[in-house]
Amino acid sequence: SVNHLLSGMIFSGWFLLYGLNTWQVFILHSIGAIGWEVTEHFIGVKEHLRNKVMDVICGNIGLCAAYFFLFGLHALIIWSVIYLIMQVLGYLAYRKRRVQDK
């Protein structure tokens, strides 16, 4: 999904910008993405296993985008702001839907 692609791109972009090598970023991102999916499971987010796997894969595709396009500082700031806005709007929509389902 778009948010996982962007999160992988942003997370990886920041670490690449600050000098970590690609394998270090890949390992950190993979641990973080898998950890997030496990956390979602324990807090009650209902997703199919295929969706969880695709979330991690989309994040790693974002890592590839960050690596191949080597975003600079200004671009990473812009992408980070866009991502944060999308996350807030998504959360608000989720809460609204959750209230309507009750």
Image (spheres, rainbow, N blue to C red):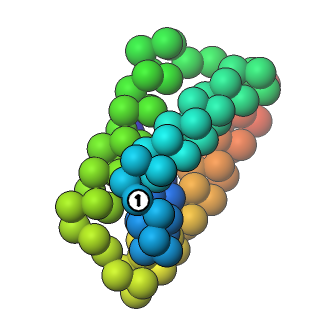
Q: Residue at x 47, y 80 (%)?
A: 77
Image position, residue 84 (x, y; %): 57, 65
Relative to 72, is 97 above or below?
A: above
Relative to 78, is 14 above or below?
A: above
**Residue that lies at the very extreme toward the left in this rendered image:** 68
In the image, taking residue 19 as reference, residue 35 lies left or right, namely right
At label 1, which amino acid type do we have? Asn
Image position, residue 87 (x, y; %): 57, 56
Image position, residue 79 (x, y; %): 42, 71
Residue 61 in view (yes/no) = yes
**Residue that lies at the very extreme toward the top in this rendered image:** 49
How would you rate the neighbour count of disc 1 (Cα within 10 Å): few for under 14, some for 14-19, many for 20 or more?
A: few
Tell me the quadrant of the picture where the C terminus can be found. Answer: top right
Q: Residue at x 47, y 63 (%)?
A: 20
Relative to 42, is 23 above or below?
A: below
Residue where numbered disc 1 is placed: 21
Tell me the quadrant of the picture where the N terminus can be found. Answer: top left
User: Which sits in the foreground, 64 or 52?
Assistant: 64
User: Which sits in the foreground, 39 or 47?
Assistant: 39
In the image, taking residue 32 as reference, residue 101 lies left or right, namely right
Image position, residue 76 (x, y; %): 42, 75
User: Which sits in the foreground, 13 or 42?
Assistant: 13
User: Which sits in the foreground, 42 or 87?
Assistant: 42
Q: Residue at x 35, y 81 (%)?
A: 72
SS of the residue at dot 1? loop
